[in-house]
Amino acid sequence: MKISVVIECLENFAPLSLQEDYDNAGLIVGNKQDECTGIITALDVTEKVVQEAVSKKCNLIVAHHPIIFKGLKRLNGANYVERTVISAIKNNIAVYAIHTNLDNVIAGVNKQIAEKLGLQNLQVLEPKEKILKKMVTFSPKGNADAVRNALFKSGGKLGNYSECSFNTEGVGTFKAEPGAHPYIGDIRKRHEENETRIEVIFPAHLQKQIVASLKAAHPYEEVAYDIYPLDTNLTDFGSGLSGDLPKPLSEKKLLLVLKTAFKLQTIRHSPFLKNKISRIAVCGGAGSFLISQAKASGAQAFITSDIKYHEFFDADSEILMADIGHFESEQYTIALLADILTEKFPNFAVLKTKINTNPVNYYI
């Protein structure tokens, strides 16, 4: 199995088009055409993780955080990033990062946090904008159902509704020129055909797939279609999640639950408000950009990390904010990546790193 097959699996789960502009997800080191000998999943890529991959005879590391965020001007081992990249190249270890694109799928990083807390009725806090498109095509009336069914494999889903489309009837015209092989009609003679105009919404990252499905199912030699970008948000993709607890907890009890579920030594939090917590907002990693969205979701608590001193004031006696640590909030991503790959490749070696890459320590 080639590394490219593993990448395809990961990008089907979390398409690269969903990553944020500042991010650097994707294949960072290595050749995707190499045969994959084994996979190690990790949160971070360090020299120790590369050496672990070497010792386990795995030539692919799939990590949440990219080892390279900014362009490197030289590789002389001056810092841990350069040393890690040099080690990966020397040992022919490919490094793949699946970062904010994994944050932005509802079944990704934040769902791991939600599941540890038993949250139900999950909703995305900040749906990602402008990731929907609309396809408009025209089919002979008798073939419209087959064309629609092909499009529904990649589109036509709105929330909990699938196979959504809009259809209108009309008359199309064309004249086949010499060299054409028309499905219907004669060469050099204008033809009129009763056609159905079909409109279907689809996620932008599936454009190649939906166009291929259209062309495979459509009877015409030359298939006419238009694609339009939409401003509509898709609630399955975006930053953060909110959800309901099975039963309300006191603020102190919630913090105790967090300490156990995430193996925490300490929690930084805003002042207690003496509220019962029934709805919680979560964001793995640095999530302070979602404070206002957490409040708007109706949550009484927001669980995230990397909250700065002045950002705690933004709780403003409206919500309990708890900073559980960056590594701690994303630690279960390692198992998530292993589960995604093991489900797809049950007979292939997928290992979880044994290296604790958390750079933050606490003196208790």
Image (cartoon, rainbow, N blue to C red):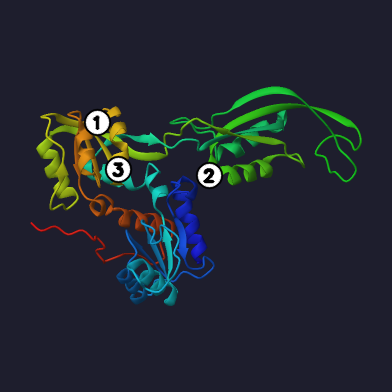
Q: Whole-percent x and y of residue 153?
A: 55, 40
Q: Which of marks 3 and 1 is nearer the N terminus?
A: 3
Please state which amino acid type lies under the numbered disc 3.
Gly
Front residue of 357/307: it is 307
Observer-nearest of 279 and 274: 274
Q: In the displayed structure, would residue 19 be above or below residue 82? A: above
Examine the image and state in which quarter residue 308 appears: top left
Which label lies toward us, 3 or 1?
3
Above/below status of 28 relative to 223: below
Residue 56 x, y percent position in the rendering: 34, 74
Badge 1: few (under 14), some or many (20 or more) residues near its Cα, within 10 Å? Answer: many
Residue 48 placement (x, y as % from top left): 30, 71
- Quarter of the image with the C terminus is bottom left
Residue at disc 3, secondary structure: loop
Q: Farthest residue in the top direction?
A: 169
Vertical comparison of 360 with 205: above or below: below
Residue at the image point whose x is 33% and y is 76% from the top: 55
Mark 2 nearby-residue class (10 Å; few <14, some 14–19, many ≥20): some
CA gap between label 2 and label 3 equals: 25 Å
Q: Mark 2 points at which residue?
A: 205
Tell me the tag on residue 299.
1
Please name the amino acid that badge 1 sits on.
Ala
Question: How far apart in space, not on screen, are marks 2 and 1 (Cα)?
Answer: 31 Å
Which numbered mark, 2 or 3, is in the foreground of this view?
3
In space, the residues marked 3 and 1 are separated at their CA atoms by 15 Å
Q: In this view, does 127 lie to the left or right of 172?
A: left
State the residue position of label 3. 287
